[in-house]
Image (cartoon, grey):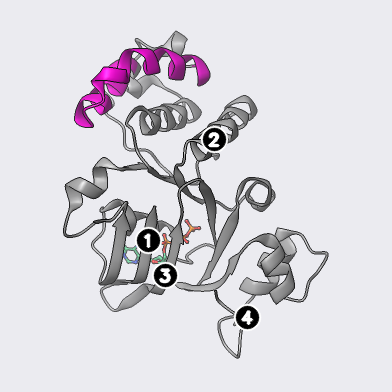
Amino acid sequence: MLQVANLVKDYKRFRAVDQVSFQVSPGEIVGLLGPNGAGKTTILRCVSGILRPTFGQVLVCGHDVVQDQAGAKSRLAYVPEVPNLYELLTVEEHMKFVAMCFQTMDVFESLKEELLERYDLTPKRNSLVATLSKGMRQKLAVACALIHRASVFLFDEPMIGIDPAGVAEFKRELARTRELGGSILISTHLLDTAERLCDRVVIMAKGKIVAEGTLDDLRHSSHLEDADLEQVFLSLTEEDSNEGPGLPVR
Ligand code: ATP
């Protein structure tokens, strides 16, 4: 379970995230959507413990990311938009290193083969990370996120740069992870994918949540009964949509 309550993040005098609250339950995929600069990555960085919130609280399976960083991080897997990988390790060494850090060596051997196969990394298992293509790096980052027994998964634009087979596999992976009770938060600009994949979406604009709910909830609240997510998104995030009475935020 991921709980974000009244999260605020200031970069000096600029408020990038303003009083954001939402949660992701076990077995749920939530899409974090918003135009460029809306604050999505900042939220993911606060949740992952990379950035310290200015105000507010983030709980990962009940562990506060500021007060109990180790507890929170042990339950969390984060795949950033541009994965930070250790260039001088091989693919297999990288996966092993992650398993050692998260103390999941007991399942490493069996999981490793499965993940290498699933993400087409078997031929590259002995290659240095520095020699991988962009998409392969993304696949390795996803594989590493799955190698430790996390309960909360954060993905920032995970499907950018991955080939269609990799994207299909990633979607199956999300479905499997949801089945196993994982809480998944995924930031993406791919609205048609979000529409198919996510149980709920949180739509941000200018650091604030402008709407949250299932697609049906959003259609209903925006009076666009037959619209797809793209149409709803555009109606909610168009210029100045934060001003005036706005739409209900659940
Ligand atoms: P995108 O869809 O383009 O990736 P985003 O929704 O992820 O955007 P953020 O990267 O969270 O948005 O940025 C939110 C705002 O905070 C933007 O106005 C951005 O310029 C600003 N910002 C982000 N990082 C910093 C930083 N280190 N210092 C100052 N401002 C920052």
| 124 vs 58, nearest the viewer | 58
Q: Which mark is residue 21?
A: 3
Neighbor class of circle 4 (other Cα within 10 Å; few <14, some 14-19, many 20+) is some
- For the residues marked 2 and 3, what is the alpha-carbon distance in whole angstroms? 30 Å
Q: Amino acid at mark 3?
A: Ser
Q: CA distance from mark 1 to mark 3?
A: 8 Å
Q: Disc 2 versus disc 1: distance between alpha carbons?
A: 30 Å
Q: Are marks 2 and 1 in contact (CB under 8 Å)?
A: no
Distance from the alpha carbon under mark 2 to that under mark 4: 34 Å
Rendered location of residue 93, percent (x, y):
27, 17
Q: CA distance from mark 1 to mark 4?
A: 23 Å
Please tell me the numbered disc located at residue 3.
1
Specify the amino acid type for callout 1: Gln
Give the labeled residue for mark 4. Answer: 247
Considering only order in the chain, which callout, 1 or 2, is on the residue closer to the N terminus?
1
Q: Of the residues tagged 1 and 4, which is closer to the observer? A: 1
Which of label 2 and label 3 is nearer to you?
A: 3
The residue stretch that appears in magenta: 92-120
Q: What secondary structure characterizes most of the magenta part?
A: helix
Q: Amino acid at mark 2?
A: Gly
Could you tell me which residue is drawn at 34 percent across and 22 percent down?
A: 129
Q: Which residue is mark 2?
A: 161
